[in-house]
Image (tube, helix red, strand yellow):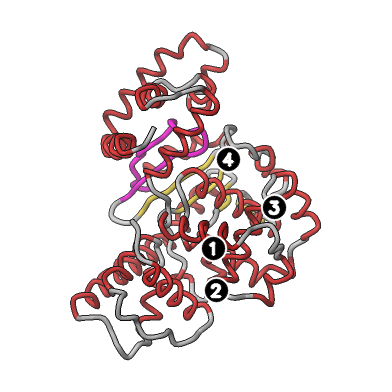
Amino acid sequence: MKYNKQTYDYFIGLINAFVNDKTPAPKPELVSWSDILSLAIFHKVEEIIFKSVDQLKDRPSMEISRRFFNSRNHNKLADIMQIEEGKVIVDNFRKNEIDVIALKGWVLKGLYPKPEYRQMGDIDYLVRAKDIDKCIPIMKLLGYEAEDVGLDASHDEYGKKPYMKVEIHRRLLPPTEENHWYTDDIWDRLVEDEPHIYHMTKEDFYLYHLLHFEKHFSMGGSGVRSILDHYYILKHWKDDIDWEYVDSIIEKMNYVYFQSMTNQLAIKWFGGEEFIGDRLDENILSEDDLFDAGIFILDSGAFGTEENYQKWYFNKLKKENNVKSKKGFIFRRIFMERSRMENIYPVLKKHGWLLPIMWVRRIVYVLLHRRDRIKSEYKSIKDMEE
């Protein structure tokens, strides 16, 4: 989903006005309210855009205003439901002696001016790997459907209509990620608030924020909200973080460039020189590189695009597995290499001879439960250049 430069500039300007508590500039003639609304939905910042637009004298048409209003009502209901359901889930895990920590958006909500301005697509939790299967009957008892359980190296997915999507992670990063070494022992560094309920240190939360952002940025793209999250983390926690420790880990992760890009975009789009300025190294990125990164983020939306993900994965297989054609790529997507299959089906680590059986099991599951994903992937692969 791509728009012209004027639309992107005005979209960022509306968010900037919200962040800095200012009245936004009037809408330029070449920018349409319909595009601004679509971008807001694409990046999951409708509440923020609505707040800024609500201050303008030159308001959108009745039709666009109605769409804004409907979107806002949906988001408010989703936010209320997520908060209440989130508390119930944590309480049930605690009662069943399952150690748990709420991740990402749940924490970030507390850093925004009001929690509802930080929208969540789903709620993420981390539990110990040994407890992941204990969560299944609890979630079902709470009315959730197990939508994708046991088929991902990192997490299980649950849903409850109309608003709830929950991911329960057994690890923060899959072993295929280069920097999984830092999060593999995260439980050793978590702080216990009360029996079985934990939180991350500010240093670990900041580092995980960058790890999670970079993973999505590299694989399929990640949107404006990731830069906005970064802004609010530094605004509230900058003076509380042990930067000597963080910088040493950033260097080991080879994330100096990525952190610099994130800092520079945060200042360029939203300001915050007073708490981000001394974290900058402006010589790392050129203006052209920074501009390209910004456009990529704006084009990607909150969760990236299927097209970007397939391009990333195709290039990865080209480099690591000598896959050179779309046919070879499709074959490898269906019959994944044993190392990736072991992450999904740990039994393969001891019984490699089960690999063909697990291929068939995965294919059957995907055909029964993820047909929409198959169609989306096939379309992206079909349109992809070799």
Image coordinates of residue 51 in percent, x first then y, are: 39, 79
Three-letter amino acid code at disc 1? Answer: Ile
Between discs 2 and 1, the one toward the N terminus:
1
**132 inside magenta stretch:** no
Of residue 40 and residue 196, the one placed in the foreground of this image is: 40
CB of mark 2 within 8 Å of CB of mark 3?
no
Between discs 2 and 3, the one toward the N terminus:
3
Tag on residue 173?
4
C-alpha distance separating marks 2 and 4: 29 Å
CB of mark 2 within 8 Å of CB of mark 1?
yes
| Left or right: 94 in relation to 234 | left
What residue did someone put label 2 on? Answer: 270
Three-letter amino acid code at disc 3? Answer: Val
Q: Residue at x 52, y 45 (%)?
A: 218
Tell me the SS state at disc 3: helix
- Which mark lies nearer to you, 1 or 3? 3
